[in-house]
Image (cartoon, helix red, strand yellow):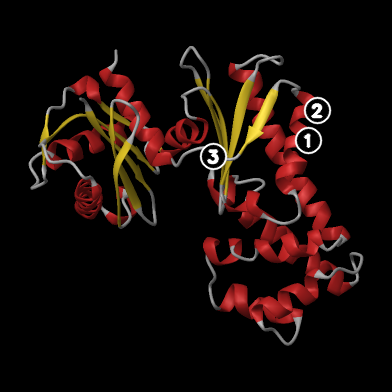
Amino acid sequence: MSYVLGIDGGGSKTVCVLMDDLCQVLGRGEAGPSNYQSIGIEATLQSIQSAIKNAVETAIITNTLKMDAICLGLAGVGRVADIEVVKGLVKELQHKKLPITWALQPANIVICNDALIALVGGIGQPVGIVVAVGTGSIVFGRNYEGHTKRVGGWGYILGDEGSAYKIAIAAMNAALKSYDGRETSTSLIEGFKQHLDLESIEDLIEVVYRRKWGVKQIAALAPVVDFAAASGDILANIIIDDAVKELVKATSTVIDAIFTADSVLEIVTTGSVWRGRCNIHERFAASLVKKFPNVKVIFPRYEPAYGAGLLALQTTQN
C-alpha cells in the first residue's frame, strides 16, 4: 500500500489530506496560512508540519505510515526560484518530528501553484480548465499533452477582471454616478447604505479612503451587487454581465491556446463569486457553451488538497 500527502497552502489556511493508492482519503488536517512570501519560510514550514500531523492523527491506521510521495500546491508558487525555495522546505520537513516515515525520491515530490490542484481536485483529473473567481480571478488550463495556459491572476491593480473586488469597485462607482445624476437611478445606493450603516452614500469616502480599506474589505461588498442584480436592478445587472463577459473572454483564450473549438472538456468554477443568487454561474455557462458547445461547466467535485493528493499518487504509478 502506498501513502501520499496532498497539501493545499494558501494565505488563510493550509489543508493536508492523507491518501492511499486507491485514492481514498484516510485523514485530513488543517493549520494556519502557508504563503511563504507573506509570512516567511519558518511560519510556512510550521503550518505545513501541523497540517500533516493533524491529518495523520485523524487516520485510523495501526501500522507505521511510509510516505511515498507528496504534492504541495501553494499560492504564489510559479517561478523557478519559488520552486527551489519549497524544495528546501520539503527537505527540512523530513527532519521534523512527525508520526510517519519518509520514503521520498525527487521524482515523487510535486511542487506547483494552487491553480493546478484546484483544477485537478475540481474535475478529478489533470485535464480541463479552472475558473477561480473570488477576491481576485484567474483562469488556468491543462490539456492531455501536459501543456498549460494561464490567463489573469495579475492582481487587483493590473487585472482580476470579473472578481469580487472589480464587481464591488464598479458598483460603488455606479452608485456615486447615480447619486450625481450622471447615471440612472439604482438600488445600489440604498444597498451600500444599509450594508455599511451609512447615513448618506457620500460616507463611502470615509469608509474607503479614511479607514484605508484594502482589497479584501472592498471585495466583501460584492454580495450587495449580487442582491441588487437578483432583485432586477439595471445597473447591477450590467456590472454582472460585464464580469461574465470578461470571464468568458479569459476562458475562451485558454481554450483557443491549448484546446480546439470542438474539444470535449470540463470547466470547473471555484470561488465565492459563483455562489451568488443573481445566476452569474448560469449566465457564464450559457455564454460559454454558446461559443463552445462541447464544454461542460461544473462546480468542484473535490477540494484542491485532494487534487494535490491525486498528483502525488500519479508519481508513484509512473
Marks 1/3 in contact by CB < 8 Å: the verdict is no
What secondary structure is marked by label 3? loop
Q: Is residue 242 left or right of residue 83?
A: right
Instruction: Please tell me which residue is depicted at 16% across the width and 22% down the height of the picture.
Output: 105
Looking at the rendered structure, the kind of residue marked 1 is Ala
Contact flag, marks 3 and 2 (Cβ < 8 Å)? no
Residue 181 visible:
yes
Q: Quadrant location of the N terminus?
A: top left
Side of 68 where 95 appears, left or right:
left
Query: What mark, if any, has residue 290 been given in the picture?
Result: 2
Q: Pick whichever, 277 or 216, lies toward us.
A: 277
**Label 1: which secondary element:** helix
Residue at image mark 1: 286
For the C terminus, the quadrant is: top left
* Residue 24's disc number: none
Q: Residue at x 23, y 23 (%)?
A: 108
- The local secondary structure at tag 2 comes to helix
Can residue 78 be seen here? The reply is no
Crowding at label 2, few (<14), some or many (≥20) Cα neighbours within 10 Å?
few
Which amino acid lies under the numbered mark 3 shown in the image of this protein? Pro
User: Mark 2 is on which residue type?
Assistant: Lys
**Pointer 3 residue:** 300
Q: How crowded is mark 3: few (under 14 residues within 10 Å), some or many (20 or more)?
A: many
Residue 14 at x, y = what percent? 33, 50
Q: Do the residues labelled 1 and 2 touch (CB within 8 Å)?
A: yes
Q: Residue at x 73, y 66 (%)?
A: 172
